[in-house]
Amino acid sequence: QQPVQSPQAVILREGEDAVINCSSSKALYSVHWYRQKHGEAPIFLMILLKGGEQKGHDKISASFNEKKQQSSLYLTASQLSYSGTYFCGTEWMAGNMLTFGGGTRLMVKP
Amino acid sequence: DAGVTQSPTHLIKTRGQQVTLRCSPKSGHDTVSWYQQALGQGPQFIFQYYEEEERQRGNFPDRFSGHQFPNYSSELNVNALLLGDSALYLCASSFGQGVLNSPLHFGNGTRLTVT
């Protein structure tokens, strides 16, 4: 089953924070996060594994709540370059296919 | 170090025709996955190739078929094209099927338009 992302779209001013959620009705092994800019390939951001810790780099981090089967992506002090569509991809066992959510469109304005 | 390359970038076909899309994986990668992305939606998994065999398949009809060559490159074939097949087709490569922490590296895709 396809994971559900929320919100579907969000508009921010530079420097503001945002949270994007990804929920699954099925027990998950891992959650992947990708960002896609218009007309470009999706770019890998990070993987969170079942039982793993919160990960992050720069001002983008994520967590994985196994009880809720939900992952959240945190964007802190957003920059113009953060604009794009964020996709979560879920994997219910190691090596299984990655199933992507419908995406969250993020626009950061000056 | 070349990333994932796909060809052609754009393609226009007529209903009922057949199409072949090509993908070269990132250097060092041996697994290729194909995704279909309709406008405004997330990528939908078509199938994955590893060691020249189809290992996993999503919910796509048999009109969609593929192949992986000994050099790890891959082809996606679609027969009897329908208008609904119009989409961006993304190829993604990774290392080792089932390897932990193996992210997907995507190509820029092939935009297929069926008229």
Image (cartoon, grey):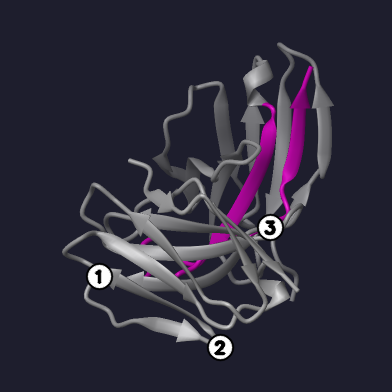
Q: Is the same chain shared between marks 1 and 3?
A: yes
Q: Mark 3 points at which residue?
A: A41
Asked if the stretch drawn in magenta spans residue B14, the answer is no
Q: Do the residues bearing badges 1 and 3 touch, measured as CB atoms within 8 Å? A: no
Residue B114: x percent and y percent? Answer: 75, 21
Q: Residue at x 20, y 60 (%)?
A: A68
Quarter assignment of residue A16: bottom right
* Label 2 crowd bin: few (<14), some (14–19), many (20+), radius 10 Å: few
Query: Quick one: label 1, few (<14), some, or many (20+) residues within 10 Å?
Result: some
Amino acid at pointer 1: Lys
- Residue A90 in percent (x, y) is at 37, 56
Label 2 marks a residue whose chain is A
Secondary structure beneath dot 3 equals loop
Q: Of marks 1 and 3, which one's residue comes earlier in the chain? A: 3
Of residues A43 and B64, the one drawn nearer to the viewer in this rendering: A43
Disc 1 on helix, strand or loop? loop
Identify the residue under disc 2: A58
Residue topped by disc 1: A50
Q: Are marks 3 and 2 in contact (CB under 8 Å)?
A: no
A29 w.r.t. B44: above or below:
below
Neighbour tally class for label 3: few under 14, some 14-19, many 20 plus, Cα within 10 Å = some
| Residue A20 makes an appearance in the image | yes
